Image: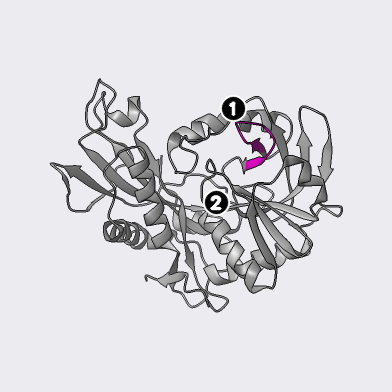
Amino acid sequence: MEKPHIEKIDWKNLPFGYIKTDHNIRCYYKDGKWGELEITSKEHLDIHIAATCLHYGQQAFEGMKAFMGKDGKIRLFRWQENAKRMIRSAEGIHMAPVPEELFKKAVVKAVLTNKQFVPPHGTGAALYIRPLLLGTGAQVGVKPSAEYMFLVFVTPVGPYFKEGFNPVNIAIVRDSDRAAPLGTGHIKVGGNYAASLRGIITAVNAGCGSPMYLDAKEKRYIDEIGAANFFGIKNNTYITPKSDSILPSITNDSVMAIAEDMGLKVERRPVPVDELESFDEAGACGTAAIIAPIGEVHDLETGKTIKFSKDGKAGPVSTSIYSRLIGIQFGDEKDKFGWTEIIG
């Protein structure tokens, strides 16, 4: 892929997709230890045909962002939580975990060596950061690799949903599951996303932006919205599902803290799908989506539609939370929580 000229990038109309940048950062685990960071401009990997990431799914990743403030300084948002979550993911499928300091050094180096690709303040865009951990050792038997690669690449992105911060329609899917109880739904590994593709295509074919997955055991409770957490708002309360098969979202954790600070009650509990109709507002949240208000939920099995937006706009509580969150991320609002770190 040819790298675009910086001056030709339309920062305000960026899609959520891959744009070639200058460098990515790599590090290798061999003989029981991590090596030194390497900088490369290559976009492809030289990987063994029997690597465990290719055959047995030994792969984990993270998603995070860097933001350009109006002061010209670049901010990382809660990188420590991403580092900890990648360690949990690695341990969940028996990979060599990436130490927090190595994680940070690689992320910072990836951002600063591609500094010109951090979207300008005021465009609404950000630099997406993708740390990736792969089992690279050759195994034919089903067992963990002895060798690993950790790499970090970056790309400037716009909104995850084409609607931006406007209501998106969601489809309840029941003919597939994203993750099973006692499976890998609580860690960020590629297999969860492969399992979600069927539901995503089903939702898109139904004219919706993303699927709503229900719990795999009973199909009674809301699990996740594709690649994001669900939330509902009613009675001055922010409600989000609690489940062992849901990925703990750093964005959702941040939103809950903001909601409490705004005077809302916060409940993390099983949320029956039958409760949907009682919410005044509903949405999806995650690093990529930030907050995506839900306009309608379509039940593809029953044909029922539940509407949350009557005027095509996000609800007032979701709007307030979103404004507060992005204000902190871009440095426009005081970070009373200590979430952001200036790196350049």
Q: Residue at x 59, y 71 (%)?
A: 327
Quarter placement of the C terminus: bottom left
> Where residue 101 sits in the image (x, y, percent)?
28, 61
Q: Is residue 123 visible?
A: no
> Where residue 232 sits in the image (x, y, percent)?
72, 53
Residue occupied by mark 1: 198
Q: Is residue 248 left or right of residue 273?
A: left
In the image, the segment drawn in magenta is: 211-223
Label 1 crowd bin: few (<14), some (14–19), many (20+), radius 10 Å: some
Quarter-of-image position of residue 239: bottom right
Q: Residue at x 81, y 56 (%)?
A: 280
Q: Is residue 317 or residue 153 the one in the foreground? A: 317
> Where residue 200 sits in the image (x, y, percent)?
62, 33
Label 1 vs label 2, nearer the camera: 1
Amino acid bearing label 1: Arg
Q: Residue at x 56, y 30 (%)?
A: 197
Look at the image and say whether residue 176 sits in the magenta stretch.
no
Q: Is residue 52 or residue 267 the one in the foreground? A: 267
Quarter-of-image position of residue 334: bottom right
Q: CA distance from mark 1 to mark 2?
A: 20 Å
Amino acid bearing label 2: Ala
The secondary structure type at the circle numbered 1 is: helix
Q: Is residue 189 left or right of residue 314?
A: left
Residue occupied by mark 2: 288
The secondary structure type at the circle numbered 2 is: loop
Q: Earlier in the sequence, mark 1 or mark 2?
A: 1
